[in-house]
């Protein structure tokens, strides 16, 4: 494996950086395999509490590497195989209990939209631009775009992007719900979000992410059963017990202050 995606760790924070800037981080065969390998590794690691997904160079991801595919003996079966490889990594992140924040700059095109939407929180820079480009080159959506794009922005807007090759800017992406926020320094803001997760009830953030992601694709009764089981398991953890006790104590103190004679006298004045 090469360094098409760089994986680093800082305690419980895992970082994945797309590292093919000369190709606008387009996904080729090797990069697809690397993505799956790292996704399976990170999501199976209990010491990982949060993930940052970012990219080197001027663009986040230009989708599939059309240059690599057109200059080789690539057949449709090869494209299907690499798509399925990348899909395994996407599914691993989406279905995991690891909250992911994506830091996005420049172009996000084609399958890059799907990789971006693997994240649960997306911070875009002012220069970010988002476009499908599939139909323009005679191809159809892959890398989860047909599922995650309409889930984020609605079917009508997703179809407009896919059928009209519409390019939208960062403010429009924010208005449509494609990204979570736009920041002047997206890297710093992405780091801040990940650190917030790690400084708080990390496991609870991760399970909340998992429940929401899974809930979109399951029967309601199954979601309710998962919620009940998950909150019970969380309640038995030392972290949750300490937080619940602290919250209860603070609530009791607040109630006592409200009920005290001095408080009642102040309120009457």
Image: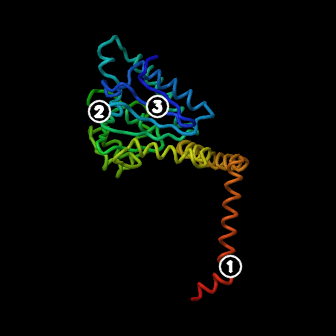
Q: Nearer the viewer, mark 3 or mark 2?
A: 3
Q: Residue at x 67, y 54 (%)?
A: 243
In the image, residue 245 sits, relative to residue 154, either above or below, namely below
Mark nearer the N terminus (1 vs 3): 3
Give me the C-alpha separation between circle 2 and circle 1. Answer: 64 Å
Question: Which residue does the image show at 53% across and 37% down from the upper left?
Answer: 13
In the picture shown, does residue 252 fall above or below 106?
Answer: below
* Front-lying residue, 226 or 125: 125
Q: Residues within 10 Å of mark 3 (few under 14, many from 20)?
A: many
Which mark is on residue 62?
none
Nearer to us: label 2 or label 1: 1
Q: Earlier in the sequence, mark 3 or mark 2?
A: 3
Q: Quadrant of residue 151?
A: top left
Residue depicted at x 45% and y 35%: 53
Q: Secondary structure at mark 3?
A: strand
Percent position of residue 5, x then y:
43, 25
Whole-percent x and y of residue 21?
A: 33, 27
**Disc assigned to residue 133:** 2
Q: Is residue 1 left or right of residue 42?
A: left
Position of residue 103 measured from the top left corner of the image (x, y, whole percent): 40, 40
**Quadrant (top left, top right, bottom left, bottom right) of the C terminus:** bottom right
Q: Secondary structure at mark 1?
A: helix
Q: Earlier in the sequence, mark 2 or mark 1?
A: 2
Q: Name the residue furthest bottom.
A: 269
Q: Residue furthest right?
A: 236
In the figure, residue 265 lies in which quadrant?
bottom right
Q: Which residue is mark 3?
A: 16
Q: Which residue is mark 1?
A: 259
| Residue depicted at x 64% and y 84% | 264
């Amino acid at each position: 494996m090469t360094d098409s995606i760089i994986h680093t760790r800082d305690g419980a924070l895992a970082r994945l950086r797309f590292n093919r800037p000369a190709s606008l981080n387009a996904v080729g065969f090797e990069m697809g395999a690397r993505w799956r390998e790292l996704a399976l590794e990170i999501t199976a690691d209990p010491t990982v509490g949060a993930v940052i997904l970012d990219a080197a160079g001027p663009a986040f991801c230009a989708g599939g590497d059309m240059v690599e595919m057109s200059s080789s003996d690539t057949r449709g079966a090869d494209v299907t195989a690499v798509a399925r490889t990348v899909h395994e990594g996407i599914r691993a992140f989406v279905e995991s209990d690891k909250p992911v924040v994506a830091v996005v700059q420049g172009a996000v095109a084609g399958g890059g939209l799907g990789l971006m939407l693997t994240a649960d929180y997306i911070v875009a820079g002012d220069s970010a631009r988002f476009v499908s480009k599939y139909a323009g080159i005679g191809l159809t959506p892959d890398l989860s775009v047909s599922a995650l794009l309409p889930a984020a922005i609605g079917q009508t807007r997703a179809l407009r992007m896919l059928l009209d090759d519409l390019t939208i800017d960062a403010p429009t992406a924010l208005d449509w719900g494609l990204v979570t926020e736009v920041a002047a320094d997206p890297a710093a803001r992405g780091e801040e979000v990940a650190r917030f997760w790690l400084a708080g009830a990390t496991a609870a953030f991760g399970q909340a992410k998992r429940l929401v992601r899974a809930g979109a694709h399951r029967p309601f009764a199954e979601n309710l059963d998962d919620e009940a089981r998950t909150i019970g398991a969380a309640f038995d953890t030392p972290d949750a017990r300490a937080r619940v006790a602290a919250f209860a104590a603070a609530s009791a103190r607040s109630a006592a202050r409200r009920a005290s004679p001095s408080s009642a006298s102040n309120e009457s004045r």
